Image (spheres, coloured by chain):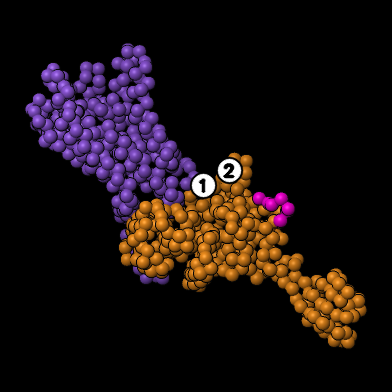
Amino acid sequence: MIEASGLSKRYGATMAVDNLSFSVPPGQVTGFLGPNGAGKSTTMRMVLGLDAPTSGSVTVNGQPYAAYRRPLFEVGALLDAKAFHGGRSAYNHLLCLALSNGIGRSRVDQVLDLVGLRSAARKRAGGFSLGMAQRLGIAAALLGDPPVLLLDEPVNGLDPEGVLWIRTLLKSLAAEGRTVFLSSHLMSEMALTADRLIIIGRGRLIAQTAVADFLSGGTGNFVRVRSPQAGALATLLTRQGAVVVQQADDTLHLTGVPCEAVGELARANGLTLLELSARQASLEERYMELTRDAVEYRTAKRAPAPSPNGGQS
Amino acid sequence: MNAGASPRSSSSSRSRVAGILRSECCKLRSVRSTYWTLFAAVASNVGLAVLLAIFLPRQLSAHEKATIDAVRVSLGGLHLSQIAFGVLGVLVITSEYDTGMIRATLGAVPRRRLLLAVKIIVFAVTALVVGIAAGFAAYFVFQAFLTGDSLRTSLGDPNVLRAVIGSGLYLVVLGLFGLGLGAIARSSAGAIAVLFAVLFVPSLIMALLPHSWQTTIGPYLPTDAGGAIFTVHQDSGSLGAWSGFAVFCLYATVPLVAAFVLINRRDA
């Protein structure tokens, strides 16, 4: 369980994180989502006690991170995959971290096996690909077998196989009852991995919700119906309280009425339907809708899309 | 998943500090820069001792041979080895900041002052062992390569043992000075630049100042004060061996104290 309350961080005139309150429950993958520069990494650094909040507080399983005497047993973190000394071997990198918390060599071998780096363990980590570096970072996070995992953009720059591996691993860790907190600027990734979402923009909380609730709450959901008697159908539907938008001679977009009701209505009135379908906004569309006003770096054409290969926020 | 990670049984503060000590030892011995810098230091000490023993006696007059500080001459490699120790001291802390490793380190050890103290201890002990060994190596190699007896000394002569061991102490304190600078600058390039400036620039400026200033301030410059510990024939104006060394330690204390203050105040 991670709990933030009124968390704020000011850099000069900018509020990187602005009065952020959220909680990350155990047993689920919670996605931490926001455009580049939204304050995700800053928030994660504050969780780990690396950056001091300007105001507010954040606790991990009820205690501030810095209060833990052997924190690797409480929280495993991956902030920056390449954050190791390039001249040190993967094994020694992990061993240095492990020793500081009284973790033995056998556990280092175990986590190396777990992430599939056994064969490269004695090589200089500086020569690792980004995918191997991410695996090394995750191995470090798992050293203390912690109940809480916190990962900043863990799939950034990974090949599809690596992405799938991390996704599966994180889900299995959450299924074991751990708290998994995962940041990304890619909604599509979160859609596949996360159970819950915490969405921020410009340092402020935009939404904190289950993925399913997040989808159904959007304005992008409508029913599409095609009929040769579209005019008559529109009149009937309007009488039923639906909002009807005529798209073409035979095509209507409806909101405020479920698919089933449209079908029943058509049958009862002997109208022919050529097509009847419910359209749900994708997570991506919902995300865009929510963060439209909170994107810090916008392209000139007012396209609010976050860059898919951008750096960390 | 639950197999293997050590239990939290022994979380007494003594075992916790022991763990951090082992971790920092592991860091120091698992990178090549440690071996390179220490090797460079020993090689400079020994190499210059050989060259000085072979070539210097031929160039000195009889009077010079009688008055020169032959022990200090034998330790002439310090001019180079001090650079290596200073750089290693810097790297002990800046390699963490340059690579981003510091975040993982502070994630594992959130008590930053404890971490810094342990880093200082691990470096100091390593530097002490290698520094003193390098001092003795230089001294004995110099004696071995001397052809005449004019510059020959013995460890039993007054102050000779102190000077040889003192050369090691000098290197330790210089390295700690670098470590302090590194912890403040948090970047190798910046800290090494400042280190070199502090080592070499004051003497250059001093040479431009009036003679009376040179005699009053000169002995208190970092390298002059620190040099007293490996000098046998003290100049009349210079500080005594231990008082000079104390001044030198004071120089190193300044950045270290600043580092202890800053490390808890700054974001990592």
| Closer to the eye: label 1 or 2 | 2
The residue tagged 2 is A11
Few, some or many C-alpha atoms within 10 Å of disc 1 (few <14, some 14-19, many ≥20)?
Answer: many
The residue tagged 1 is A52
Q: Disc 1 on helix, strand or loop?
A: loop
**Residue A88, position as x, y percentages in the image:** 36, 54
The chain drawn in purple is B
> Which residue type does callout 2 highlight?
Tyr
User: What residue range appears in magenta?
Assistant: A297-303
**Residue A41, position as x, y percentages in the image:** 55, 53
The chain drawn in orange is A
Q: Disc 2 on helix, strand or loop?
A: strand
Q: What residue is at 74 percent from the left and 73 percent from the top?
A: A279
Q: Is residue A20 visible?
A: no
Q: What residue is at 35 percent from the left and 28 percent from the top?
A: B200
Q: What residue is at 23 percent from the left and 40 percent from the top?
A: B43
Q: On what subunit does the disc labeled 2 rest? A: A
* Rendering quarter of residue B123: top left
